[in-house]
Amino acid sequence: MEKFKIKNQQDTRSGFGEGLLELGRKNPNVVALCADLTGSLKMDAFEKEFPERFFQTGIAEANMIGLAAGMTVGGKIPYTGTFANFSTGRVYDQIRQSVAYSDKNVKICASHAGLTLGEDGATHQILEDIGMMKMLPGMTVINPCDFNQTKAATIAIAEHVGPVYLRFGRPKVPNFTEENQKFEIGKALMLNEGVDVTIFATGHLVWKAIEAGRILLEKGINPEIINIHTIKPLDQETVLASVRKTKCCVTAEEHQAAGGLGESIAQVLARNFPAPMEMVAVNDTFGESGTPDELMVKYGLDTPDIVRAAERAVARK
Amino acid sequence: MQTFTFEALIPIQMADTSTLKRTCSQVRRDIVRMVAAVQSGHPGGSLGCAEYFVAQYFHNLKHDPKKFNMDGKNEDLFFLSNGHISPVWYSVLARTGYFPVSELATFRKLNTRLQGHPATHDHLPGIRMASGSLGQGLSVALGAALTKKLNGDKQLVYSLHGDGELQEGQIWEAALFAAHRKIDNVIATVDYNGRQIDGDVENVLSLGNLRSKWEAFGWTVTEIENGNDIDQVINGLDHAKTLTGKGKPVIILMRTEMGMGVDYMMGTHKWHGSAPNAEQTEKALAQLEETLGDY
């Protein structure tokens, strides 16, 4: 666990912005659309360097999704950018019909997901987006954990033909994965091989899982820690192999328990290898205003919550 | 796996007006027979748009039914936004050779490519976007038009919308955007029949002065007074094309009669989404000459 060092504190949305710019330089078919949040999404660098391939749509997200779907006809690879709330709930039917059902190569890139959006409060803190997106047939759902991984994912999804939902966040968080890493869609990443309990974490909760792992080791529990950056398609093989070994697990995510990573893993386990499982997730409530750190504590998504969940899971074996 | 044979094709862009009129009659027979066979579907708007589709696919569009591909580079593209009038589209696609005419018999049946509302996931040639949930097709057409511009592709993008569909907010988001970005390689058409499923558009939610609205949104507006007159539709499309490339999006307000060609389906909204029974079907078909051979 000591191998994981914080390189710096960076926001995952900046990883998206850098990835998009780099991608724009190497793939002329990549185009970007943004609904009046260019600065927030860090898409301004792309806009400046490729003005002819950037489309400001104004505060009109439904039109943005339709435009993106249409732009694929003729070979473009559109990346849409707005907050996660407006990327999913606001435009669900547009995504469902014009993108998912029509199997269009649109990359829906969503920032400010979850509680860590902070002070803006519950109107903007969507905690249901993973669920909505993973329910759509054919949709790939990705939730990278830090700046470097978000950048790599942004570049990698251009190679995948089909709709993708890429989720990232607002605050600066520990950047600890490798720079210029290879990102493989659908491949769970083993962070620590352990034997007593598996912690499956996604997004901002991956670093907290590592922190929790250090505490658990001191308590004599040796956890396996796995980064699930792709929630759909889920790496079922890795999930099952790990839980067959540890016999219990914890899932950790900045999302409602309903519809999230935990639910996806519960489905796999229930069908193949039922085992004690604990979920670190928001439990059927809206968020509120506060700092990201305060909110993660209040809603039970912090490092000690993962530690306690792991202890509970182990005790249930 | 069913096999289909191609039949009754007309060489595209070689047909004269009288042939096109005869084609419309057959298309109307196809529509009535398709919805009657499964006792579901939307005959009213389909019948009203027969001339538009025949004018587009047999005369106006630059397209190649035998080499359909999703990207449609250097071809004109067509998007149907009001997907419920799928019967008229399917009939015309089949009659122009996108797929066998005999496949029309599978409309709305299990395992068909001819879904109740148009879909791409069964790879039916001619369809580039699913539609049915209303209000989405203008955005899609504008996106395709932007890509044509980026690709240096000079061909045009067409879309068709119901008038009731204009009650959807997304249409007006798209309308703003098109004018703002000066998307002048698109020709949208409104099937202005004045009726929607619950009644007259005027009573359900009035569109007010539609011409003024589109003009205020920065579009060039042109009209087809009688969208059930094939000559007027052809001339209207020709005229609309002369308005493209001038820095403004173009829209045609095309007056049609819902249910056109079947006397008891005209002058009412009642046949928007209901199928005729056996006796009504017989009565309808008696009014529509079989000109190209029924499927």
Image (spheres, coloured by chain):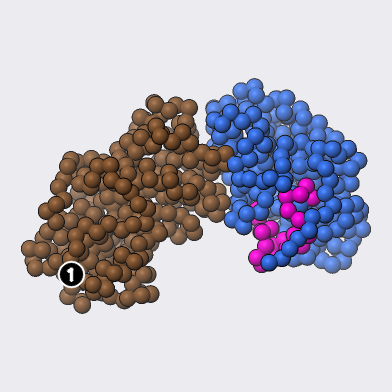
Chain colours: A brown, B blue
Q: Residue at x 33, y 72 (%)?
A: A269
Which quadrant of the view contains residue B176?
Answer: top right
Q: Residue at x 38, y 45 (%)?
A: A156
The three-letter code of the residue at mark 1 reads Val
Q: Nearer the viewer, residue B9 or A172?
A: B9
Residue A25, horizontal then vertical, whole percent: 39, 32
Q: Residue at x 38, y 48 (%)?
A: A166
In this figure, which residue is indicated by the disc labeled 1?
A195
Instruction: Using the rendered image of the protein, determine whether residue B198 is visible from the camera's viewpoint.
Output: yes
State the quadrant of the C terminus of chain B: bottom right
* Left or right of B241, for residue A28: left
Q: What residue span does the magenta drawing correspond to?
A: B95-119
The subunit letter for the residue under badge 1 reads A
In the image, residue A36 above or below residue B279 = above
In the image, residue A242 above or below residue A106 = below
Q: Which of B122 and B27 is in front in this view?
A: B122
Q: Does the magenta stretch include residue A277?
A: no
Residue B168, horizontal then vertical, whole percent: 59, 44
SS state under label 1: loop
Instruction: Using the rendered image of the protein, determine whether residue B205 is visible from the camera's viewpoint.
Output: no
Residue B113, horizontal then vertical, whole percent: 66, 59
Q: Nearer the viewer, residue B203 or A314?
A: A314
